[in-house]
Amino acid sequence: MRRILLLLCVLVTACSSGHAAGGGELQFVSSFEGGNLYRAGQVSVVQLRGTYRQMGRQYGRLLQSELRDLYDRAITGYFIGKSGYTMNHLKTVAHAVFDVYPQRYKEILYGMAETSGLTREEQIILNGLEWFPKMKTSGSRCSGIAVWGDYTKDGPLLFGRNNDDSSFYRQFARTMVIAVYNPTDSSVPTAIVNYPGVMYAVNGINREGLFLELNSGNFTGFVTNRLSIFTTLFSFLQDFPAIDSLEPAFQSTRTNFASIINVADANKSYSYECPTSDVKRRTEDRPGLLVATNHFVDPSWGIPPPDDAANGLTVTRRNNLLSLAEKYKGAFDISRMKAVLDTTIHDGGATQPEETIYQIIAVPKELTLWIKAPGNFDWQRADLRGLFDR
């Protein structure tokens, strides 16, 4: 009888903490101090609760093996072992990223270091994973496409996103993480997608169905005495539940590097084009369609398209997505969006054979993400509805 009661308690706990949220697709793995770890294939999904320090502790313990593995492969094995970076260089770059974090986000990394087996300094260095080669370059190149209305045959809005980067980042995308933060303050519960231990929002969705993702824009350098737009976007998701409430937030923000930030909810999508000195909100390209790559296209800028070959074929990628959208107008669903994102640039799409590191399809109405890391794993579905606290 005692064993039966214990088993029932375990099952009730798993279901109440979100185990059943994905309709059986999220597989419960373990718990620690109120946080839970699930898997959607090779995608780790952590449900975190409490103060920011407590959520960091949960993250660190639940993803302990992934954090150590990525540190050993990326920091020790690649950047120092193969690429000749010095530890001093890595520390300098990592602290340039970390030192301007709002205190609550620092607390997450401090908490990770208490339970992950990495030191605080190692945790800070791992957090800078995407930045070490980028301080003197224009950074990653990405593509985004949102379809709704007449493009989706009465289906929900879909946002497809390619995260492109230097090809060696593919070896680090073996395990991607969706971290669902449910803080004890009044913030909106928010999920961000990134590498293990990398704590900022280049991709994220909040409990109210507000999704955003960041592409690099026309390169205008870095401004070092500003908050990172990556952490600012995390704050936006936590502080602004609705898409139109973002407008004054963006108009009050100057980015630390030129960015294109695409936002969407269940009904519409905008693209914020942000050089380091200004911001413009661009609406749909056509009713029910928005496409953004890595150059500003709002005509009020008065600037011509950049040299395509020198800028990651950004014009070609944008034109290809616009063409594919027209080709499949009225037929977009998850399968069609997968097919569009699986189309390489050589075949008339936007995906790059080596530089597309991971891809996301967001369905804001359903609080669902699909994630693929080419060369590592195929499309995996993560239904997040049961992981956001109410």
Image (cartoon, rainbow, N blue to C red):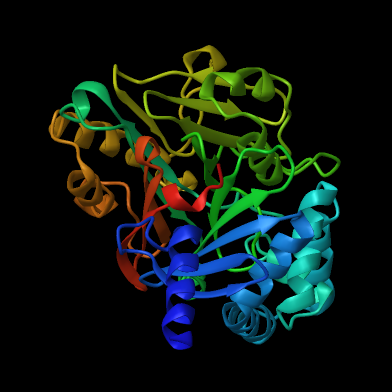
User: Which of these two is toward me, 15 or 215?
Assistant: 15
Residue 370 vertical position relative to residue 34 in the rendered view, above or below: above
Decide if residue 25 is in sight here: yes
Residue positioned most to the front? 1
Q: Position of residue 260 (x, y in %)?
A: 54, 34
**Viewport quadrant of the N terminus:** bottom left
User: Which of these two is toward me, 16 or 24?
Assistant: 16
In the picture, residue 123 is in which quadrant?
A: bottom right
Decide if residue 176 is in sight here: no
Residue 209 vertical position relative to residue 312 in the rendered view, above or below: above
Q: Position of residue 272 (x, y in %)?
A: 55, 26
- Left or right: 88 in relation to 18: right
Identify the residue at horizontal 77%, vertical 73% (top origin): 113
Identify the residue at horizontal 42%, vertical 71% (top origin): 11
In the picture, residue 258 is in which quadrant?
A: top right
- Left or right: 70 in relation to 7: right
Q: Position of residue 283 (x, y in %)?
A: 43, 18
- Left or right: 267 in relation to 275: left
**Viewport quadrant of the C terminus:** top right
Identify the residue at horizontal 39%, vertical 23% (top origin): 268
Identify the residue at horizontal 70%, vertical 82% (top origin): 80
In the picture, residue 63 is in which quadrant?
A: bottom right
User: Which of these two is toward me, 31 or 3?
Assistant: 3
Residue 352 vertical position relative to residue 275 in the rendered view, above or below: below
